[in-house]
Image: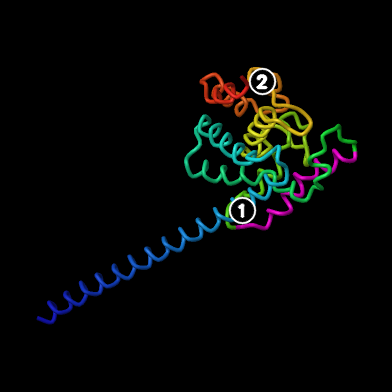
Amino acid sequence: MPGFFLGITALVAVVLIYQSNRQTIKTQQKYRKQVEDFTSSIIKAFTNCIDGKDSYTNGHSYRVAQYTVMIGKKLGLDQKTLDKYYNIGLLHDIGKISIPDAILTKPGKLTPEEFDIIKSHAQRGYEILKDVKIQEDIAAGAHYHHERFDGKGYPEGLAGKDIPLVGRIIAVADAFDAMSSTRSYRKKLPLDYIAEEIERCTGTQFDPEAANALLELYKEGAFDHLKEKEE
């Protein structure tokens, strides 16, 4: 009989531990979801501030994030990485919030000094995001999206695969959206011309894998809705 009661006691203990652990897991999952939702809302708030700086680039950050995910899918990245890259893409231009509006939205040609100020947004974006630890590599897009595959970009002058993959992908997505959007200094460019430019700059300005992934999307008709807006 003592053995029977010991067995019952052990079974009850196991059940209680299981119930306790399940409740703990539920609480952790709920907390994790709350943190994820809060992080997402903060990122979107920052994104709206970034795009709100210039009416010509309204929606730019969201489109770049979307194109980044599309390219990433073509490259076979997993969903967890794609979700991370989407958020990194949203914040790639955060450094522009520190650029004076008179320079950022100037309709004419920039002076060399003004262009240097514009270029500083990559480093400034990194400085803003570098201490944010809630999501890994959140500063990478801001820091590296103007690096070039041939090493002639900024701010670090990195080349090839020394540039983090997310930076190489966003560089293509950013350039594609910039050319397919009307800016203060020019109208949007025809989609066929943009594709030719991306192809021409593959291996110099752009990582070949990322650029070719975007060109595949173009050939598959993923951007045909932009052609319709040209007409």
Residue 142: image location, x then y, percent: 69, 45
How many badges with numbers are in the image?
2
Residue 131: image location, x then y, percent: 67, 58
- How many C-alpha atoms fall within 10 Å of the one at disc 1: few (<14), some, or many (≥20)? few
Q: Is residue 186 magenta?
A: no
Q: Residue 45 carries which label?
A: 1
Quadrant of the frame with the N terminus: bottom left
Check the image and name the residue furthest to the front: 231
Residue 146: image location, x then y, percent: 73, 37
Q: Which mark is residue 190?
A: 2
Q: In the image, is residue 92 above or below residue 14?
A: above
Residue 92: image location, x then y, percent: 67, 44
Check the image and name the residue furthest to the left: 1
Q: Which residue is drawn at 68% across and 47% down?
A: 50
Where is residue 177, by image quadrant?
Answer: top right
Q: In the image, is residue 223 above or below residue 41?
A: above
Cβ–Cβ under 8 Å for marks 1 and 2: no
Where is residue 213, by image quadrant?
Answer: top right
Disc on the earlier residue, 1 or 2: 1
Q: Residue 209 carries which label?
A: none
Quadrant of the frame with the C terminus: top right
Q: In this view, does 18 lie to the left or right of 125?
A: left
- How many C-alpha atoms fall within 10 Å of the one at disc 2: few (<14), some, or many (≥20)? some
Q: Distance between the residues labelled 1 and 2?
A: 31 Å
Q: Is mark 1 on a helix, strand or loop?
A: helix
Q: Is mark 2 on a helix, strand or loop?
A: loop
What's the magenta region? 113-133
User: Considering depth in this image, is 157 or 65 the residue closer to the camera?
Assistant: 65
Q: In this view, does 116 lie to the left or right of 198?
A: right
Q: Main secondary structure of the magenta part?
A: helix
Name the amino acid type tagged 2: Pro
Name the amino acid type tagged 1: Ala
